[in-house]
Image (cartoon, helix red, strand yellow):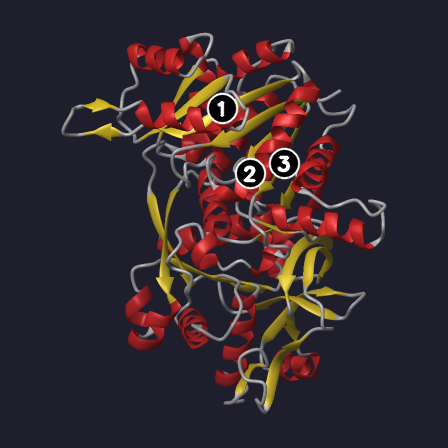
Amino acid sequence: MSKYVFVTGGVVSSLGKGVTVASIARCLLDRGLRVNVIKLDPSLNVDTGNLNPHEHSEVYVTCDGMQGNVDLGYYERFLDIECRRNAYVTAGLVMRSVLDKDARGEYLGATISTVPHLTSEWKAYMRSAGSPDTDVVVVEVGGVVGDLENGAMLEAIRQFEKELKEAYVHIHMTLVPYLQGAGEVKTKPTQHSVRDLEYVGLHPDMIICRTDSGVELTDQDKKKIAMFCGLEDLRCVIHEPDCENIYEVPLVLSKQGADIIICHMLGLKVTGGISNKWQEMVEIATSNLPVVNIAIVGKYLENKDAYLTVKEAIKSAGYKLRKHVNVDIVSAEDIEMVGAKDALKNYAGVVIPGGFGHRGIEGKIATARYCRENIVPCLGLGLGMQTMVIEFARSVAHLSDANSTEVNASTSSPVITKGNGEMRLGDDKVHLKDETLARRIYGMPDTVERHRNNYEFNNAYREKLENLGLIVSGINGEKDLVEVIELKDHPFYVGTLFEPEFRSRPMRPHPMFITFLTQVLSIEK
């Protein structure tokens, strides 16, 4: 039977539970254990693909087309795995499952209640994450303990821990603030958070204390937390300060013995340690390397994680090439006002990312033109590729009204149109044509890439644009869909309808980003 590690959060949100959960799982994986990671989300959203990046950061897409939140990306990058739709569930999905069962008569006329019906559904989901092939399931519990919406979820965990008997570890993650005026850290918020946890019948076996970088958590502080929070030993109080690079977190946890303590609590044999390859990657990532500046031209500027996976893919390519990549988000709406040349003059390369809606489109189109005419390496992803096609159609094919029907339904030149009515989500096949840059990038004729797009290249304009120099270098042969475009006389001007960033890893960066950054560096020289 699989054993479980539950990670709850307290005091405030945005503590970085996703990174911490992924780091714990990474530590256990490097200890030779077979690990699965799941997230329980208290939100009532059923379709998480509708979440606004302004508020909730990016939407992450798994290989089987499930849309979840940003934490899935941490799991995939830290563990070098491919999560599937069973890695993430919301309270909305759990509630819908209960209501569907009631509609089918599966409860035989019983009065539907939070307990046992909702809690049983949560438990069934957690139980399904374990298997004979999994030693440990690490469960990220979304939200903050004490929040009203977490009630049913936490009650389900309480019941499930009782059923697991000793086969679980409960980790509580809290904020330990440093008060400048008092000149000391304050443990009272952690004590109160644990009290909230115990109020719902849960007790921590380990507490991870988040602090600002540079804040010291002494043994005396740890002893105080352990005593007031009922922990066996001060070694069960783990200090996790802000790190220069998120990939340092597994090293920080392992150095304090967190993974060994977890294994001992679960009765699992301890072997190995953080892999040498991971340590080498972190050493490179935190070294004083030459800097290259890259711009992401987007429109979701309010949330710093709105383009997180794209940024990580670019930075990972930098680790491979031993460069530090400084990635800035440049507002597409600002470019509409000040022009691409002024906004982008200090950047050696540009990425135009995916997105939806008309806002900022003209700024992205102006960006594409600037990069095409000024020989600036440019990578367009999803909507970014579509804007590159629109710009080419307007500027080179002289189709002045060229647009996407998403932006202008009545355009006379719809070079980008609605697909078959359903969004393409998850993995799909891509065939790469001979003697193209795309084929050289991948080094193989066929690949599989993840998609998240509603709109497609309109094949009615394909021949006209190809005759004028636009190269269609990647297609989906089965569906007759354009997947990759590029220009012949440009060092790197490539657009992909798919989203290659979802398959990039810190120790195994995607070749599209490696080639993009390589061309950026070759021009800089």
Left or right: 229 as drawn, with respect to 40: left
Residue type at mark 3: give it: Ile
Q: Does label 3 or label 1 sit earlier along the sequence?
A: 3
Decide: few, some or many residues near mark 3? Use Cα within 10 Å; few <14, some 14-19, many ≥20: many
Residue that badge 3 annotates:
38
**Relative side of 295 to 464, left or right:** left
Front: mark 3 or 2: 2
SS category of the residue bearing label 3: strand
Mark 3 or mark 2: whose residue is earlier in sequence: 3
Q: In percent of the image, x 78 and y 68: which residue is there?
A: 479
Q: Can I make out residue 283 in this image?
A: no
Which quadrant would residue 324 be assigned to in this image? top left
State the quadrant of the N terminus. top right
Name the amino acid type tagged 2: Gly
Instruction: Name the residue carrying label 1.
Output: 198
In the rendered image, is residue 265 in sight?
yes
In the picture of the structure, the residue carrying the numbered disc 2 is 151
Considering every residue shown, the one lying at the far left of the view is 181
Which mark's residue is nearer the viewer, 3 or 1? 1
